[in-house]
Image (cartoon, rainbow, N blue to C red):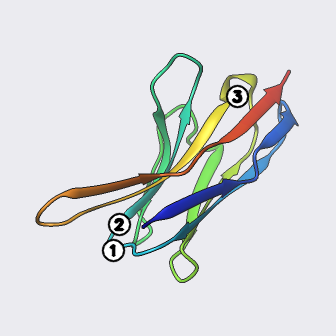
Amino acid sequence: QVQLVESGGGLVQAGGSLRLSCAASGNIFSPNTMAWYRQFPGKQRELVAGISSGGRTNYPDSVRGRFTISRDNAKKRAYLQMNSLKPEDTAVYFCNVAWQTAVRKYDYWGQGTQVTVSS
């Protein structure tokens, strides 16, 4: 069974930084994509950053240039460095790992960590 545990969330002032960590365990196939999503109250989760096993990254315009995703394949960890945080970044942040086989797609989520940015 795959498990993801996020850490590093908290309260920070606008303009500050936080670094989120995601520790994965269990049988994780490679290649895979690790990603961070966030969810605002009453809204669907949205992609914040994604990174492939080979290190290719993608970001939406809302965070590009401020957030950086990285991963350590040996440790099964992913990170999200968030700089220049804004109050509108306040959300619950979730770690995700996913891969595709010939039979099905596998998709796992962490429990989420709260990030609050005060103005």
Residue 2, quarter of the rendered image = bottom left
The residue at the point 58 percent across, 79 percent down is 75
Find out whether the residues at labels 3 and 2 contact each other: C-beta distance under 8 Å.
no
Mark 3 burial class by Cα count in 10 Å: few <14, some 14-19, many 20+: many
Q: How many marks?
A: 3
Please tell me whether mark 1 sits on a helix, a strand or a loop: loop
- Residue that protrudes farthest toward the front in the picture: 1
Determine which of the numbered discs, if any, sits on residue 32 in the image. Answer: 2
The N terminus sits in image quarter: bottom left
Give the Cα distance between marks 1 and 3.
32 Å
- Given residues 16 and 101, the one toward you in this image is 101
Q: Would you call the spot at circle 1 few (<14 residues within 10 Å), some (14-19), or many (20 or more)?
A: few
Indicate which disc, 3 or 2, sits on the residue closer to the N terminus: 2
Question: Element type at marker 3?
Answer: loop
Residue where numbered disc 1 is placed: 29
> Badges 2 and 1: C-beta atoms under 8 Å apart?
yes
Which circle, 1 or 3, is nearer the viewer?
1
Q: Quadrant of residue 84?
A: top right
**Mark 3, residue position:** 90
Looking at the rendered structure, the kind of residue marked 1 is Phe
Write the residue at 56% across / 36% down. Answer: 38
